[in-house]
Image: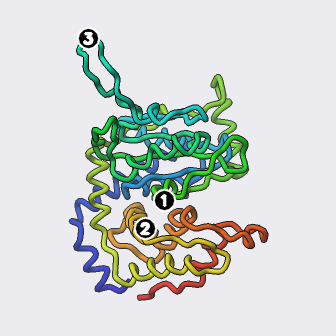
Amino acid sequence: MNDSTASSAASAIPADRLTQAIGIVARMREEIRSAVIGQQAVVDQVLACCLAGGHVLIEGVPGLGKTLLVKALAKTFSGEFSRIQFTPDLMPADVMGHAVYDMKTQSFSVRKGPVFSHLLLADEINRAPAKTQSSLLEVMQERQVTIEGESHQLPPPFMVLATQNPLENEGTYPLPEAQLDRFLIKVRIDYPSVDEEEQMLRLVTRDRVGDGLDVNQVATLVKPDTIVALQQLVAKIRVDDAVSAYAVRLVRATRDWPGIAIGAGPRGCIALVRMARAMALTSGRDYVTPDDIKAAALPVLRHRIAVSPESELDGLSSDDLLLGLIEEIAAPRG
């Protein structure tokens, strides 16, 4: 990005508002990291997804801190937080709510489900069948719930943070493509490093009963209105035309890239820019760089493409193919 572009970008948001927003985001990040040992890139991606007003799918084997990460984020602001443990017998009404007939008044009243919150943790979402998974489609897309033909709006902000176990695990159901597309990003939590695991061991076993990490030390910093204001500020972050064109080239390249059977649709471009804007703010800038697009590409696109059977036989994952694509597609210079 050249100096003139950066200068015009810098005028998009008042300097005092930008400084204040950067400070709030930095404090939120530090509070989350105080509870989650390691996984710094994952923490940054989940926080950026929240700032972008999106939903996040977190994948990893049991015991890596997926639920802890979500609870730590929820603790940083004073909004309503709900958790649903997805199981094979969970019904859509258990998620959305249902109408109840009152014998005294001889009328129906709506009993709202746990989805009526600011942050919804859908824990182990792929342990429920497709019918229950799809009950979240409307609320994730339109921020509303329809019960007995009546629509109920959810107050902003609203974010679904779903965790899932890898599909190789017993008792899991694959998420439908339409459901996957509703998630702005998909992040993967891997095993901790040796130092991180030793730190975790010392923290959990020192003067504690049980084996859980808690979020009691995480400070509550902001109100729901503050999150909404941050999301509105992110939407104003400047994206140069050359950077937008680069995002389009990356997404379009997935549609005919060797080893990719199904490429990302136009929603992938939109998601890529939304996420890049939020990542720019977490980096202390009010303009998007090509590096922001690159950093957002994996979490935004990995669940929007399908790997060909030949690539699977060769042991290639969606991340492997996307990394090769990102390396080959030229980024703008300036």
Q: Is 122 placed above or below 98 here? A: below
The answer to whether residue 300 is left or right of residue 197 is left
The secondary element bearing badge 2 is classed as helix
Which of labels 1 and 3 is toward the front? 3
Amino acid type of the residue that numbered disc 1 sits on in the rendered structure: Asp
- Identify residue type, mark 3: Lys
Color theme of the render: rainbow
Q: Badges 1 and 3: C-beta atoms under 8 Å apart?
A: no
The numbered mark at residue 114 is none
Query: Mark 2 highlights which residue?
Result: 267
* Quarter containing the N terminus: bottom left
Give how far across and how far down residue 71 sits, in percent.
49, 38
Residue 135 position in % (x across, y down): 45, 43
Residue plotted at (32% across, 43% down): 222
Say which residue appears at 53% left-offset and 67% top-offset: 301
Residue at position x 60%, y 42% in the image = 65
| Lower sequence index among marks 1 and 2 | 1
Q: Of callouts 1 and 3, which one flags the residue occurring earlier in the amino acid sequence? A: 3
Classify 93 as above or below 176. Answer: above
Local packing at callout 3 (Cα closer than 10 Å; few below 14, some 14-19, many 20+) is: few
- Residue drawn at point x = 47 percent, y = 55 percent: 183
- The kind of secondary structure element at disc 1 is helix
Q: What's the distance in space between the residues labelled 1 and 3, CA to CA?
A: 44 Å
Judged left or right of residue 158, residue 184 is right
Which of the two residues, 305 or 120, is positioned nearer the viewer here?
A: 305
Q: Name the residue that disc number 1 marks.
A: 181
Q: Amino acid at mark 2?
A: Arg
Q: Is residue 54 left or right of residue 144?
A: right
Marks 3/2: CA distance? Answer: 49 Å
According to the image, label 3 marks what residue? 104
Labels 1 & 2 near each other (Cβ < 8 A): yes
Q: Secondary structure at mark 3?
A: loop
